[in-house]
Amino acid sequence: MSNIDLPFRATVAEACAWLEQQTGTPWSLARLLENELTPVVWLDYDAAYPDLFGDANGGYAAPIFFKDDIARLAAGSEDILITFTKDAYGLPARLPEPGFRRPLEQLRFQKSDLDRLAAKLKQDAQAPQPKPQAASTAAKESQSGISKDEVMLAFAAIVRMDLARALDEATGIFGDDGARVKASVRKSKRNAVWNPVTLALGLHDVYRAPLGALKRAFKSHDFLHAWQGNWDESLRLLGK
């Protein structure tokens, strides 16, 4: 197949054919949008909307980026509906109800955006693949935890309770349905370990342990350093 030359603004068919040539995989409008490409539609000047066009008396390429407009296209709409875009000066502009409709064949993708996406995909494809042991390490970590002594060292001063007794009783957040790693007590309760991330979140939610003190604990103790990434990610997901 000969190389496909992209025009400055490519149709959906041109963009898909070019990316298929670059990546060796099929492309569709939905996939273009999934990769966060911003389509545009040429709007001819309309004197009824002077604020939208300003000095662009020949018209301009209006971007489509509003999530509802994008979702409609990705779902297989038969035409284009633009309810929110940018004006000719690049400022956000909500269009009058019900928005502007255009035929689907007028949708275009900027050559510069397609070039950047192709370069990114090629770079990602050439990036070193994760080592096989990464998965086994994660699996091993899920069965591990910290000992009672380490729990006491990290968290005892933060909570107003008999933490040692709570760990021994192993109920609620301290038991197998909470932070204690069930597999660790198969042979003996002396081998019990607790997932420090689960335990710390439980101490905060159930026993009102200060989040700031818990954050400092993960930074202060060497045996918690391996759990820092999981702790940070948990806080991010919880919005804390």
Image (cartoon, rainbow, N blue to C red):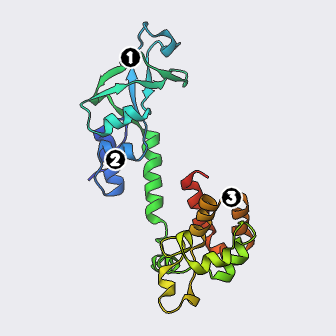
Cα distance between the residues tagged 2 and 1? 29 Å
Residue under pointer 3: 211
Residue 151 visible here: no
Q: Which residue is mark 2?
A: 31
In this view, 95 is above or below 153: above
Q: What element does badge 2 sit on?
A: helix
Q: How busy is the neighbourhood of tag 2: few (under 14 within 10 Å), some, or many (20 plus)?
A: few
- Percent x, y of residue 204: 63, 60
Q: In the displayed orientation, state which residue is furthest to the top.
A: 47
User: Could you tell me how far apart the alpha carbons at marks 1 and 3 are, in whole angstroms?
Assistant: 47 Å
Q: Are marks 1 and 3 in contact (CB under 8 Å)?
A: no
On the rendered structure, is 132 left or right of 105?
A: right
Residue at screen point 47% across, 88% down: 186
In the image shown, does 113 or 104 lie closer to the viewer? 104
Q: Position of residue 38 (x, y in %)?
A: 43, 37
The kind of secondary structure element at disc 3 is helix
Type of residue at label 1?
Glu
Q: Position of residue 126 (x, y in %)?
A: 46, 65
The mark nearer the N terminus, 2 or 1, is: 2
* In the depicted structure, whether residue 133 falls above or below residue 127: below
Label 1: element kind? loop
What is the number of the mark on residue 97?
1
From the image, state whether disc 2 or disc 3 is nearer to you.
3
Residue drawn at x 68%, y 58% as measured from the top left: 211
Give the residue type that dot 2 points to.
Arg
Vertical position of residue 196 compared to residue 144: above or below? above
Q: Residues within 10 Å of mark 1 (few under 14, many from 20)?
A: few
Amino acid carrying label 3: it is Leu
